[in-house]
Structure formats: structure tokens, C-alpha cells
Amino acid sequence: MALLRLRRPRGTAEVISAAVVVVAVLVLALRMLVAAAGALAQAWPVLLALVLIVGVVGAWRLRQASTRRRREVVRMAALRIALAEFDAMDDRRFEHALRDLLVRDGCPARSVGGAGDQAADVIGDHPQHGRIVVQAKHTRVGGKVGSSVMYAVKGTAGPVHKAAHAVVITNGTFTPDAIVWGERHGVHWVDRDRLRRWAQDGAALHELLGLSVRSRPGRFKRAA
């Protein structure tokens, strides 16, 4: 496709014609600018009002969001859950309660339990103590958690979830073999008594279990 090529005007007539066109374009542009300036001058009160309204609404929303965050921080800091409340929960609510307790301790956490969770129901990332993987075992009152749970958590916490610490938490108790195996292989455990101290009395989980600071994934410190 041939490109259009402009040539310089030839002769006085062409020069005058080109000059007339340029002047006409400049006059049209000037008129458009004057018209736009006039319209803006007439509309500025409306525009100013719109800007003020948007600013006020934005500030109000930011204030509301800030207020909600402060209330949530205060609520979480005061969170206490009694053993009787845990006993009345189902498995899912139990996991969510453990997640909220980790958040209370300053550990951003999320619930991940479900099909294919690979022995992790809650994962928290503590700024000082690293990633904490929790396996939640909600039982009937008097129920016991056996060694097989410890095996499963040990096998996935580090390799799969890149955790610094693995913890099994129950509202029941652990068999003696499970406790011995967990202590030997660095899988922390929280039984009914420790759960009470954590959830009801307000002790921080990392202090209760003596978690080390920034352990490397897959290497777990023995529970206190």
C-alpha cells in the first residue's frame, strides 16, 4: 500500500492556501479551548461538590474499616474459650476456634482442614517462631488420640507444609505411646489440660510449648 507523501507548497497560491488552512485550524482549536474553559467555569461548583462528596465518603469508609479492625483486635486479644465450649463443638468449629486462638497469640492463621489436607487442619505463620501446622482432633469427652496421628503429622508437616513446628491438639487426651513418640520425634501435643491453659487461661501457645524461634522446616523442637 502506497504511503501518502506530503510535498511542500509550490507557488504563491499554494503557500497562501496552506497558510489559510493552518490559521483556520488554529482558530478552531482556540475556540474549542475557550468553549471548554467556559463550560468548566460554569460547572466548577458542581465538580467541587462531587470531589468533596467523594472525599467525605472515602474518609468515612476508611474510618469505619479502621474502627472494625480495632474492635477485632480487642475482641481477639480478649478471646477465651472454656473446655465445655470445645466439647460442644463439631470438628469444623473446633478447627476454627484453634485458628482464632493462634490469631489471638499474634500468629496469622487459616483453616485448611478437609479432604486431602495431608494431616494439617490449621496453618499459622508466626513472625518469630515460623510456620506452625496444627492437626485438630476433636473427640468425645474422655476420648484418646493414638500414635498413628503423630506418625501422620510428622510425615507431612515439614516435607509437605514447610512447617517449623507440628502440633496435635485435642479436647481429649493422648495415649502414653503417643506422648512418648511425640516427645521423641519432635511433634508437640496439646491435651485437655494444656488446651485449658491456652484457651481458657490465656497462655500463648508458643510459650506453653516452648517453641523455638525460626526453626528450619522439618526440624521440630521437642515439647516442653
Image: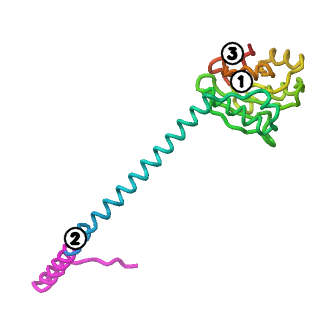
Tell me, yes or no, whether the two marked residues, 2 and 1, touch with CB atoms within 8 Å: no
Q: Mark 1 points at which residue?
A: 200
Q: Name the residue under label 3.
A: 210
Q: What element carries label 3?
A: loop
Quadrant where the N terminus sits is bottom left
Q: Mark 2 points at which residue?
A: 38
Which residue is painted at 63% across and 31% down in the image? 103
Q: Give the range drawn in magenta.
A: 1-30
| 51 horizontally vs 167: left or right | left
What main secondary structure does the magenta stretch of the protein show? helix
Q: Which residue lies furthest to the top in this view?
A: 224
In space, the residues marked 2 and 3 are separated at their CA atoms by: 73 Å
Q: What kind of residue is marked 3?
A: Gly
| Above or below for 68 versus 86 | below
Quadrant where the C terminus sits is top right
| Above or below for 222 versus 74 | above
| 162 horizontally vs 146: left or right | left
- Residue 146: x percent and y percent? 89, 24
Q: Is disc 3 surrounded by few (<14), some (14 to 19) or many (20+) residues within 10 Å?
A: some
Q: What kind of residue is marked 1?
A: Gln
> Which image quadrant for residue 197?
top right
Q: How is the image coloured?
A: rainbow
